[in-house]
Amino acid sequence: MQSHTSASASSLREDLSDYVAHLQLHMALQARNLVPSLKNSPDSREQLLQQTQATFEKHISRQSYLG
């Protein structure tokens, strides 16, 4: 019975950390949308940089809560 409770708590922590990571990513992306662009149309390198940063932030936020 004790191991079942422990497994449930572990699963809950994992679900919560996934939720927090998703929320952090969403908030970071929303914050970017509040900052006006300096150019009307960003070039492909700038778009790639933004996508890479978003992916990196997602992975980092997940690692900090899973560790």
Image: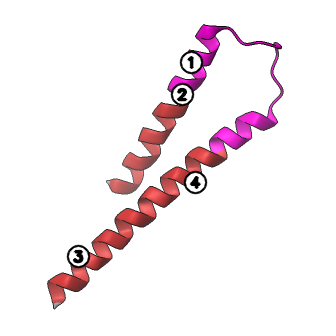
Q: Position of residue 28 (x, y in %)?
A: 64, 42
Disc nearer the start of the sequence (2/3): 3
Q: Which residue is mark 3?
A: 7
Residue designated by label 2:
53
Figure disc tally? 4
Q: What's the magenta bit mostly, secondary-structure-wise?
A: helix
Q: Which residue is mark 1?
A: 49
Is the residue under label 3 in contact with that under label 1 (CB below 8 Å)? Answer: no
Label 4, label 3: how many angstroms apart (C-alpha)? 24 Å
Give the spatial CA distance, label 1 vs label 3: 39 Å
Residue identified by numbered label 4: 23
Q: Position of residue 63 (x, y in %)?
A: 37, 47
Q: Residue shown at 71%/42% (left/top)?
A: 30
Q: Amino acid at mark 2?
A: Gln
Q: Which residue type carries mark 4?
A: Leu
Compare marks 1 and 4 and give the one earlier in the sequence.
4
